[in-house]
Image: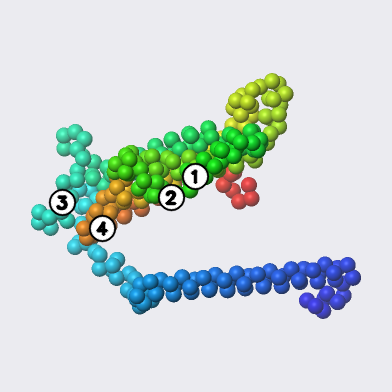
Amino acid sequence: MSAHASKLNPASQKVFEHYRELTQTRRLYTFLTIGILGGLLFAALWFAHVSNSGKFLDRIPYFFDFVLNFLPDEPIEIFRALFDLPSPLADGSLKYDYEEGRHYVFGDFYIPEYFYEMLVTLNIAFISTLLGGTLGFFLCFFASTNLVGAGATRFVVRRIMEVLRAFPEIVIAGLLAAILSLGPIAAVAAVSIHTIGALGKLFFEAVENADMKAEEGLRAAGANWVERVRFGIVPQVLPNFTSYFLLRAEINVRASTIIGAVGGGGIGEVFRLSLSRDHAAKTYAIVLLLFVTVMLVDQLSGWLRRKLVGSQAFEFGA
């Protein structure tokens, strides 16, 4: 490379030298970054080792022992637990009381316990997304610099959104449980509060990137602020809002499951109970149902986004 560089004219040689300096600097920063991350990782592992009485590193080879030993008596028991079917191993204990969890709709028709709890979790997630998305939608316009300027209104609304999304849903649920008691109501409130802050931020960033020519035309025609937002801004940002809303719905399904484990109801609560009671078949049934449900929600959300926003938005380089 240097041999070829000697044949360049002075201007090209100067550009080449500058490029080589930049390359060397980038390599130096890369090595420094890797070294710092490696040092932090080593320090974290050493801290974990010391905090666990020097047993952390010793126990790493046994990391998967719990999964290997936590097995149902028979593989078919997982499906019996999933569909609340009677078990030939039933001995009167809670471990095999699959039929007790049935939710009868009418006559002999019932919804299996874990399907019912999964519906509760989905209900929490979608109601929370609807409530949080609606409030985030209305607040985002008051947080956008191009619509309200850089005054007190924008400052106050943005700080409110920051406070609402500052704490994880599980922390908010723990605080609300003392007020609203345990159950889905506290879970809905917690997920909704966090969703307002998270979606509100995404929404106002989309609004600030909107083309203001339509708004300026409506302003010149005498339209008021609400009319300018309704007809000049909303049609532009609605596809992005829809995509963010559906993406948040996926996230809230997972969040609602986690909150259920701390008393928020739904599938998370029965998962915690089955795991703590060492009921392997029930635990694996719940894990299987969770996996299938999350996969279906992701696929459905992606399909809806493509239908509503357009396939071109998902193409590379679009």
Mark number, residue 168:
2
Gap between marks 2 and 3, in whole Å? 35 Å
Q: Residue at x 48, y 37 (%)?
A: 133
Closest to the observer: 254 or 54? Answer: 54
- Quadrant where the N terminus lies? bottom right
The amino acid sitting under disc 3 is Asp
Residue at mark 3 to residue at mark 4: CA–CA distance? 15 Å
- Secondary structure beneath dot 4 equals helix
Q: How many marks?
A: 4
Q: How is the image coloured?
A: rainbow
Residue 275, label in figure: 4
Indicate the quadrant where residue 95 lies.
Answer: bottom left
Q: Which residue is mark 3?
A: 97
| Residue at image point 38% right, 71% down | 51
Camera-near label (3 vs 4) is: 4
Q: Which residue is mark 1?
A: 163
Q: Amino acid at mark 2?
A: Pro
Front residue of this view, candidates 141 and 171: 171
Label 1: few (<14), some or many (≥20) within 10 Å? few
Q: Secondary structure at mark 3?
A: loop
Foreground tag (1 vs 3) = 1
Q: Residues within 10 Å of mark 3 (few under 14, many from 20)?
A: some
Is 28 situated above or below 124? below
Using the image as rendered, state which of residue 292 and residue 175 is in the foreground.
Answer: 175
